[in-house]
Image (cartoon, helix red, strand yellow):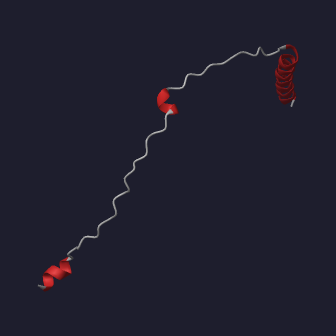
């Protein structure tokens, strides 16, 4: 049981150190605002031209089944 207690205490101490480090960063570090530029390629800005033609309608075709040919 003492080994488990030591392990749990060591994990708790590490967690406290990590938490303390995060609190210190939030308290003492101030972010520096700066201007940011992102280049966007012209292809992404210009919309693609839409096709003006309507899609072709499906034309039904006469299909011959094997039972039709066997009857002849």
Front residue of 18/22: it is: 22
Quadrant of res 54: bottom left
Residue lying at the far left in this picture: please name it. Answer: 72
Q: Measured from the top left, where is residue 50 in percent x and y?
A: 43, 46
* Apparent side of residue 60 relative to residue 41 in the rendered image (left or right): left
Of the 4 image quadrants, the one containing the N terminus is top right
Front residue of 56/5: it is: 56
Front residue of 62/27: it is: 62
Residue lying at the far bottom in this picture: please name it. Answer: 71
Residue at 66 percent of width and 18 percent of height = 36
Q: Is residue 68 above or below residue 19?
A: below
* Apparent side of residue 13 relative to residue 68 in the rendered image (left or right): right
Residue at 47 percent of width and 31 percent of height = 43
* Number of numbered discs: 0
Residue lying at the far front in this picture: please name it. Answer: 52
* Apparent side of residue 45 relative to residue 16 in the rendered image (left or right): left
Q: Measured from the top left, where is residue 30 in percent x and y?
A: 82, 15
Q: Is residue 44 above or below residue 67?
A: above
Q: Measured from the top left, where is residue 62 in percent x and y?
A: 23, 73
Quadrant of res 67: bottom left
* Apparent side of residue 66 relative to residue 51 in the rendered image (left or right): left
Of the 4 image quadrants, the one containing the C terminus is bottom left
Residue at 20 percent of width and 75 percent of height = 64
Q: Measured from the top left, where is residue 51 in percent x and y?
A: 40, 48
């Amino acid at each position: 049981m003492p080994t488990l207690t030591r392990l749990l205490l060591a994990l708790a101490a590490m967690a406290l150190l990590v938490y303390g480090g995060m609190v210190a960063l939030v308290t003492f570090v101030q972010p520096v605002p700066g201007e940011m530029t992102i280049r966007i390629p012209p292809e992404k800005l210009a919309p693609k031209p839409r096709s003006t033609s309507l899609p072709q309608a499906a034309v039904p075709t006469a299909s011959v089944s094997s039972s039709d040919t066997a009857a002849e």
